Amino acid sequence: MNELSDLISEIKDGGKLVLEHGREYHLFADDCFIYETEKTAESEGEAIRAAVFLSGKKNVTIDGGGSALKIHGDITPLLFIGCKNIRVKNLTVNFACDGCETAGSTAHCPKPDEKTPQTAAQICPKGTGAYIGNCDTVLLENMRFKGFSGTAVFAKDSKDVTIRKTECALSENGSACDGFFRFENCRGKAVADGCTARGKSARGDFLYVRGGEKCDLTAKNNCAGENAGRGVYYACRGKAFVAGNTFFKTGGAA
């Protein structure tokens, strides 16, 4: 395991981890957490590799302190499963670091070696910055997601997820992504407040909210540049409050 994994492993319920200011943590697939999904009638069990992995934790704060996670290989940088009251702030997740490239929907190093195994598709779309599954009350604040090819933040089957003052930037080589903030079958509140997105190759929506649960959406003070998808897509039971957003160019209704 790497140094960051050791720090994450020591977090207890009610704990707070403050990372070293300005530090760069280089993460490789073979020394990250491994999360085994259950085998079901619909899908085979899979092994997910994650840089920051919390499962069943409560009342945890991670303050990145301006540090950055540099991603090398097929890794989900932030993976939260079955957690409650989780807060992550002041952290950069960078798939577009030196020595790496994003081809298609797979983030990998140009020269394959034992540290960058090429594996099949997993629970999260390749290049997803944060996956929040079956959690209750999660806040991501003052985050940066760079060079991803999936979705910056993907929340599924979760309650009360807030994304605040978070910046998304695609890599400068024109690589595409599947959208920025995605909520599927969530409930309670879904909030995107003061977030920005830069890049011309987004295939999906800036903000996508869909599911059969009652989920109230708040989307305010966000800003997105040219995007092939929509500004906001909402298809849930509940209410949507959308105000103060700027979408310069979208491929559908904002």
Image (spheres, rainbow, N blue to C red):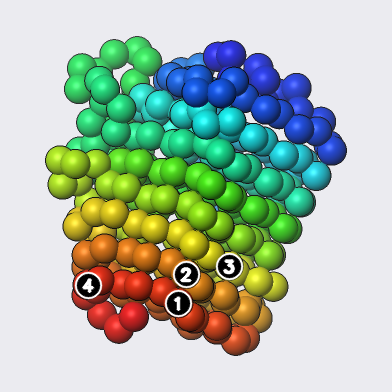
Check residue 221 in the rendering and tell me which mark sits there, or answer none: 2
Label 4: element kind: strand
Q: CA distance from mark 1 to mark 4?
A: 16 Å
251 sits to left or right of 139: left
Residue hosting label 1: 244
Q: CA distance from mark 3 to mark 4?
A: 22 Å
Residue hosting label 4: 249
Label 1: element kind: loop
Q: Are marks 1 and 3 in contact (CB under 8 Å)?
A: no
Q: Position of residue 187 (x, y in %)?
A: 66, 72
Residue hosting label 3: 191
Q: CA distance from mark 1 to mark 3?
A: 14 Å
Label 3: element kind: strand
Label 2: element kind: loop
Residue sitting at 59 percent across and 20 percent down?
A: 20
Image quadrant holding the C terminus, namely bottom left
Q: Are marks 1 and 4 in contact (CB under 8 Å)?
A: no
Classed neighbour count for the residue bearing mark 3: other residues with Cα under 10 Å, few (<14), some (14–19), many (≥20):
many
Dot placed on the residue nearer the N-terminal end, 1 or 3: 3
Image quadrant holding the N terminus, namely top right
Of 64 and 33, the residue lying toward us: 64
Say which amino acid is labelled 2.
Answer: Asn
Instruction: Examine the image and state in which quarter residue 180 appears.
Output: bottom left
